[in-house]
Image (cartoon, grey):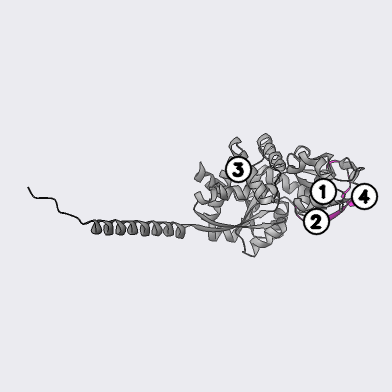
Amino acid sequence: MHAAPTISPALSRRALLRSAAVAALAGIAARDAAASDALKVDFIVTQGTAGLTLADIAFTQGFIRAQNLEAKSLEVSDASKAIAALIGRSSDICLWSGFGGVLAAIERGAALRIVAGSLLSPTDAVYSAKPHIRRIADLAGKTIGVGALGAQLHQVMLAVLRKHGIDAGRVTFRNVGSSTDIFRAVVAGTVDAGPAEIDVFDQQAKYHVHALEGGNLWSELPDFTWQASYTSQDAILRNRAGLVRILAAFGKTYRYVSSAASREAWIASYLKVTHKTDPGGAEAQWRFIQKYHPYAVDLVLQPERVQRMQQLNVELGVQKRVLPFESVADMSLAREAMALIG
């Protein structure tokens, strides 16, 4: 019987070090290979607090990473800026904004398509700091803060004024910016009223404002689809796989924030993106989401929702006619995204 060969300690250590080095290099190579397979997508989000919170959650909870995406976000104040970024090819897709202006742009010849739903009902209320302005009906003759004329926040104010019998010609609209900017202007008294997000709804006394009677937009205008995802036809042709994956990532995000498990993550991301220390606003938003479930967890936007927004555009003079669904929307990307996440 032969004796087992003797291995010196030095040789054993060298072998172990070589093995460790080889394993490390293999790990680096695998990581680099995975990174090289990642699809690049530049996406747009509007600057409301809920949208910024949602985007942060998609990154921090790993929903974007799970789709093997190298993604960057661009923040804009309204759809007009998103449309410009898409047409100029500086971004691939706008994941959420009002889309009334998108429909009007398509009618004028813009090569854009609505590809998914995001926020299916309004999440804003109309606020004022002026004691004598208590109802929507009190806005005649007043200055209302909105975003760009023709964009979502302007459109929704036109719609609610119309519902309450107020001629839009009797008010002055001032382009203030995002809903966050509008709320600051309301608090400062530089506008008489304006729409802003639900995160301040439970803190009206703190900010010395009040929500107007008839101004809870989710109950006043339940058929007003608040936000959708849209992109350019060019982006669909050159980066369809990336668009499908980013929609899948946010489909997962919508499902997550609609569940009770998301409370701590929502609060943490809200405080991060708003640079606030008081979690009250985050709690208000999160409770609203749990109660009303406004996010498009199934991504596909139904034709009747798009047609309803076109009809509103026509009534408000933003569009001349209602276009066929197939000429303004393409839900095949949303369906492919849903197939990825089940």
Describe residue 248's horizontal placement relative to residue 132 as left or right: left
Work out whether mark 4 precedes mark 2 in sequence or the reverse, and give the earlier one: 4
Task: Identify the residue position indicated by label 4 in the image.
Answer: 141
Work out whether mark 1 precedes mark 3 in sequence or the reverse, and give the earlier one: 1
Work out whether mark 2 precedes mark 1 in sequence or the reverse, and give the earlier one: 2
Mark nearer the viewer, 4 or 1: 1
How far from the left and from the top, in percent, is residue 41?
A: 56, 58
Residue 256 image label: none
Q: Is residue 169 magenta?
A: yes
Work out whether mark 4 precedes mark 1 in sequence or the reverse, and give the earlier one: 4
Query: Mark 4 belongs to which amino acid?
Result: Gly
Q: Secondary structure at mark 2?
A: loop
Residue 176 image label: 2
Mark nearer the viewer, 4 or 2: 2
How far from the left and from the top, in percent, is residue 155?
A: 78, 50
CB under 8 Å between discs 4 and 2: no
Q: Secondary structure at mark 3?
A: helix
Q: Which residues are magenta?
A: 163-178
Query: Mark 3 belongs to which amino acid?
Result: Ala
Q: Is residue 50 visible?
A: yes
Task: Identify the residue position indicated by label 1 in the image.
Answer: 194
Residue at 71% over, 39% down: 284
Work out whether mark 3 precedes mark 2 in sequence or the reverse, and give the earlier one: 2
> How many numbered discs, if any?
4
Mark nearer the viewer, 3 or 4: 3
Q: Is residue 53 magenta?
A: no
Describe residue 190's horizontal placement relative to residue 299 as left or right: right
Work out whether mark 3 precedes mark 4 in sequence or the reverse, and give the earlier one: 4
Residue at 21% over, 57% down: 8
Mark nearer the viewer, 1 or 3: 3
How far from the left and from the top, in percent, is residue 18?
A: 30, 59
Residue 265 image label: 3
